[in-house]
Image (spheres, rainbow, N blue to C red):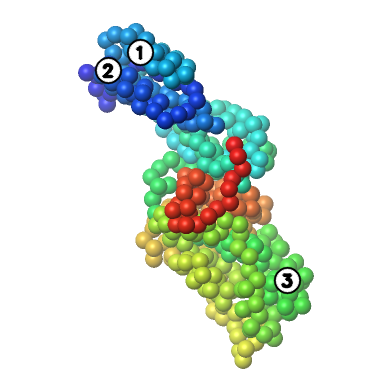
Amino acid sequence: MNDRSDPDAPRPRTVLITLTGKDRPGVTSTIFGTLARFNVEVLDIEQIVLRRRLILGLLVSEPRDWKALRDAVDKAATDLGMTVEVDKGAGDNRRRPEGRSHVTVLGSPLRSTAVAAIAGRIADSGANIDRIERMARYPVTAIDLHVSGTAPDRLRVLLTEEAARQGVDVAVQSADMIRRGMRLIVMDVDSTLIQGEVIEMLAAHAGCEAEVARVTEQAMRGELDFADSLRERVALLAGLDADCLDRVYEDLVLAPGARTTVRTLKRLGYRFAIVSGGFSQITDRLARDLGIDFSAANELEVVDGKLTGKVVGDIVDRAGKAAALRRFAAEAGVPVAATIAIGDGANDLDMLSAAGLGIAFNAKPVVQQAAHTAVNVPYLDAVMYLLGISREEIEAADAAAGIVTPAPPLD
């Protein structure tokens, strides 16, 4: 017997069987029942079903009478109403080269021209696509490509540029065990976990929304120092009744898919943190309501039931967000390399850079350029596709818990 662990051992003689046709129960068992009569060794197997069409690929050791195996498999396929190709040759599948990545592509819609362009850049880099899986087909289309042969960092640069040209999102991650382990998700709040900006909602009650929104936009683009801009905006809230904080909280609208994201990843043992340049009077309640483990934000000073226009203590700014990520990772017992940060503004940049995976979510251009990857669809749960979790798995887990999700469109 050849020892496949020895690179100098003779390459084994093999038979490749490719079966295609309408999927039905019993196809795989019938084919393997046929192969069992020849006592072959199974070296590799892949099976997919696409629009109820089955494609089954089998690599097996070559038996003494390979023609008899071919004839038997031909008959089994005919009886099943399927087609089959049987080819013999030398060699097991080659070991995949170094530089293995998961490349996740998101599009709404995902057009063939974009997939062709992404695949072309992968080929240009000298890498190979070993496998493709669909992660979701609605409300966005997401596919995961298993790629080998090029360092993930180099591939990320090439594909980020192409994704921008094609109007799709592409995430490149090293195919290592971290992706499968328990991780810590650290999220920004305003315009990430929730829609809109809390300080602008407060400003609407104070009659200065336009002025605050203008300064907020400049700060999020990185044009103003965040701490200075926050003090300037909070000063405009002086005298506002603190009861407005309750009214603003009741008016919050979560990002689409936010509850699904937290619920699903908590089932898998993930820990969650929110780190905000907003206000603890809002974020602490949000953390309790969503079951989020850690929270850090600024505290508005309240005296005699009124906002004073000041912030208590140190401001959670750009550097403060990164420090909070490291602190929460230590408290959760998670290495920083296993953290995922999600944000949209310039004050998130240090946090995104510090994390093992930094995701710019519908972010300002300066943030998209600096983050590891960008997601520009409005659904927060799309980040789960980057973690190898499919829409079907999410919905199956919800169904088991009695949570009904809208029916998807038909294939």
Q: CA distance from mark 1 to mark 3?
A: 76 Å
Distance CA(mark 2)–CA(mark 3): 77 Å
Image x and y of residue 114, in percent: 64, 34
Residue nearer the viewer, 409 or 189: 409
Q: What residue is shown at x 55% (from left), y 48% (from top)? A: 372
- Mark seen at residue 212: 3
**Closest to the observer, 148 or 404:** 404
Q: Residue at x 59, y 45 (%)?
A: 408
> In which image quadrant can residue 105 be found?
top right
Residue where numbered disc 2 is placed: 37
* Circle nearer the viewer, 2 or 3: 2
Residue farthest left in this picture: 1
Residue for badge 1: 72
Of the two numbered discs 1 and 3 in the rendering, the one whose residue sits closer to the viewer? 1
Amino acid identity at mark 1? Ala
Task: Give the residue type that dot 3 points to.
Answer: Val
Ranked by sequence position, the earlier of labels 2 and 3 is 2
- Name the secondary structure under disc 2: loop
